[in-house]
Image (cartoon, rainbow, N blue to C red):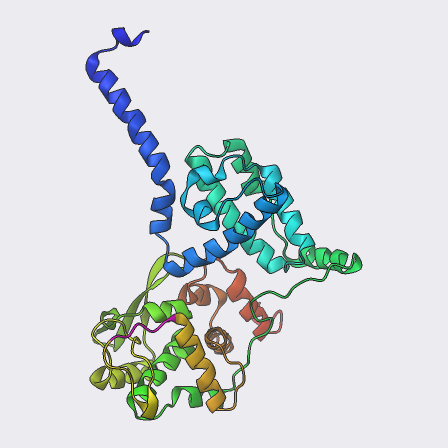
Amino acid sequence: MGDELIPTGQQALALAGRMANEYADGDIFNDFNGRKSDNTLRAYRADLGSFSTFLRQATDGAVVVSADALQTTPAAWLGVTWGLAVAYRQWLLTQGVSTGTINRRLAAVKVYAKLAAEAGAIDGQDAAKIGSRVQGYTGKAARNVDSERKAAGVATRKSTQKATHVPLTADQVRALKSQPATPQGRRDGLMMALLLDQGLRVGELAMLTVDAFESDEVGMTMRFYRPKVDQWQVHRLTDNARRALIAYLNDDAPESGLLFRRSVKGGELTVGASGITERNLSGRVTILGEHVGIKGLSAHDCRHSWATRAVAAGTDAFALRDAGGWASLAMPSRYVAAAAISNERVKL
């Protein structure tokens, strides 16, 4: 049927529909990025930077596309196929990149390749193969790959994440939460209580605001966002965290960001909300660890301690998964397995 036989109103609707589809296709990346935290976007951009380098080297400099373009512009993915994604994985292996980092970088490519396919920049079959066939390396496969690379003389770089956690004793946990009665000490005491008693990630800690806390007939609760799993949670504060919060709120807290005031000399804090960052918080944890004789303490070590102590006290993997904001049982099950005899929790 020719357009001349279609009613004018339907022609206008069809045109409007095509224009809306084109706009929606172009907005897919913006919509996705707009739903992610700055930290998540920075991590994706860093991993896409590696893919950008690969594309430039694989084409002898003919293709120069930035990480920023790969993250924001569907057209930047034109020409990307699943074969290129496979070649990228092999390139990472020959570069000596750790298997953990390879998995993370492939995950970033998969995420944005899928978006590019939805926007029409990548063939749908290629996108499907990238998602299903371009797998990373875990467990035995990771060990085999590393053994093969070692035999071939390929030096593998260590992951940027620490291979082991700094273990904390009960006395060290108490010492870290027991800070001086100064503005700086009250802020540090609250920070350590939230890390050690509530199991927060440092990014979640940095995002906390004063109005995240609420009193009820039982005690106090905290409502906060977990960017890594894109969900809001409510935690009941432990007695220690509640006392630390009250002491800090009474005298020292800014009006918005909970821990935004930075340290200055003499145990004081800067006036007002000065915008403390995750790096500042992580650095402060390391300093506080050194004060009690712990070298190299990180905020994630505190989360690890929280999970380990929770399991030792009888918390099961399901409860730990929910409280810790994990998307699956894989990580909390590791804590349970590490803390127990294999059949200790089996009831007959």
- What stretch of residues is rendered in magenta? 273-277
Examine the structure image and report whether residue 275 is included in the region drawn in magenta: yes
Asked if residue 136 lies in the magenta stretch, the reply is no
Residue at 58% x, 44% y is 55
| Residue 298 position (above or below residue 161) | below
Q: Is residue 133 visible?
A: no
Quarter placement of the C terminus: bottom right
Q: Position of residue 264 (x, y in %)?
A: 33, 86
Q: Which residue is painted at 52% across and 83% down in the image?
A: 168
- Majority secondary structure of magenta residues: loop
Q: Quadrant of the N terminus?
A: top left
Q: Left of 255 or right of it: where is 63?
A: right
Report the front residue among 160 and 236: 160
- Number of numbered discs overlaid on the protein picture: 0
Q: Is residue 33 above or below residue 253?
A: above
Residue at 46% in and 72% down: 315
Residue 90 percent across, percent down from the top left: 66, 48
On screen, residue 197 versus residue 91, left or right, reads: left
Report if residue 46 is visible in the image. Answer: yes
Q: Position of residue 299 (x, y in %)?
A: 45, 75
- In front of the other: 238 or 184: 184
Q: Residue furthest front?
A: 61
Quadrant position of residue 30: top left
Q: Position of residue 150 (x, y in %)?
A: 76, 60
The residue drawn where x is 58% and y is 69% is: 337
In the image, 344: left or right of 173? right
